[in-house]
Amino acid sequence: MCNEVLAPWSWRRQCDVAAELGYEGLELAPYTVEPEAPHRLSSRRIKTLRKTAADAGVAVSGLHWLLLAPKGLSITAADKTQRARTLEVMHGLAELCAELGGDVLVHGSPAQRRLPRGKGEAAARRRGIEALAGVAETAARCGVTYCIEPLAPPMANFVTSLAEAAAIVDQVDSPGLRTMIDCAAVANTPTEPPVADLIARYWRSGHMAHIQLNDGNRRGPGQGADDFASILRALKRYRYDGWMALEPFIYRPDGPTTAAVSAGYIKGLLAGLGGSK
């Protein structure tokens, strides 16, 4: 479960509740534990966060919502100072993910990767790819995977399809950089094929390293009409062995209930497929 669903609670309570609901991990949004400089957490704080999760029986599976804090970040900006601050945060979060025992970082942050239209767009795109190439080196060194997340327009105008993301992964050519699937983003991108087809293509090709499960209505799995059974069958068919992170954006009636419903729904589907993981 992406932890911001339970963020009104303390980290300890989030971990305890996640474990009680049957989750094996929490995907951490760094701003929820440090709103000003999450990339500069002290070693002591990192150890406490990791121990608290372990004591509850869950792992920190990785990080997402990477560039929400501190404010004013962008991988495409021309301003050198802004760019340097952004790169510092990205590299720091890759190191943080490793220290927390995580496996993947999900680079969504659409507002922090906007491309200007017209003049300057090509240069901004190059700067974005250069930023991803740089952090890929740090991720590879730390033993984690940095995933560029395709997002649906108009939310994003840079990396809006798995094909675009895969082309960047090929261009960078680093074991530290991959792409991933956000099911809601796919559902809201008319040009994208079904998620099961994307899994067949991009997991087998080695481009994909992660998946976030959410309905096209931006609620949790089981709270909309999307076919998650076919998604889970595809993951099993192609022997996906990574995390499945549940990331609803709309919590009705509230976050804890959404977390419980989503967990029960996915576990029920998995049981029907003959596996619990």
Image (cartoon, grey):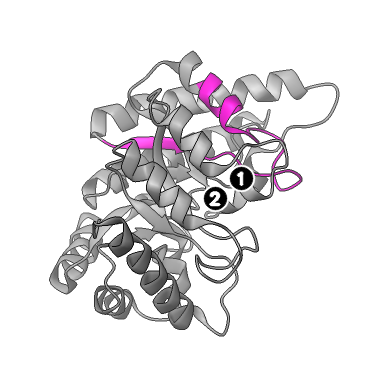
Amino acid carrying label 2: it is Cys
Point 30% across, 47% down: residue:
97
Secondary structure under tag 1 reads helix
Residue 34: give its label. Answer: none
Q: Which residue is label 2 attached to? A: 183
Quadrant of residue 121 within the rendered picture:
top right
Compared with 26, 78 (above or below) is above
Kindly identify the amino acid type of the residue bearing the numbered disc 1.
Val
Instruction: Tell me where the magenta segment starts and ends, as one range.
Output: 144-168
- In this rendering, does residue 16 appear at all? yes
Tell me the number on the disc at residue 186: 1
How far from the left and from the top, in percent, is residue 107? 50, 42
For marks 1 and 2, give the CA distance. 5 Å
Q: Residue at x 43, y 81 (%)?
A: 256
Quick check: is 138 in the magenta stretch? no
Percent x, y of residue 26: 32, 62
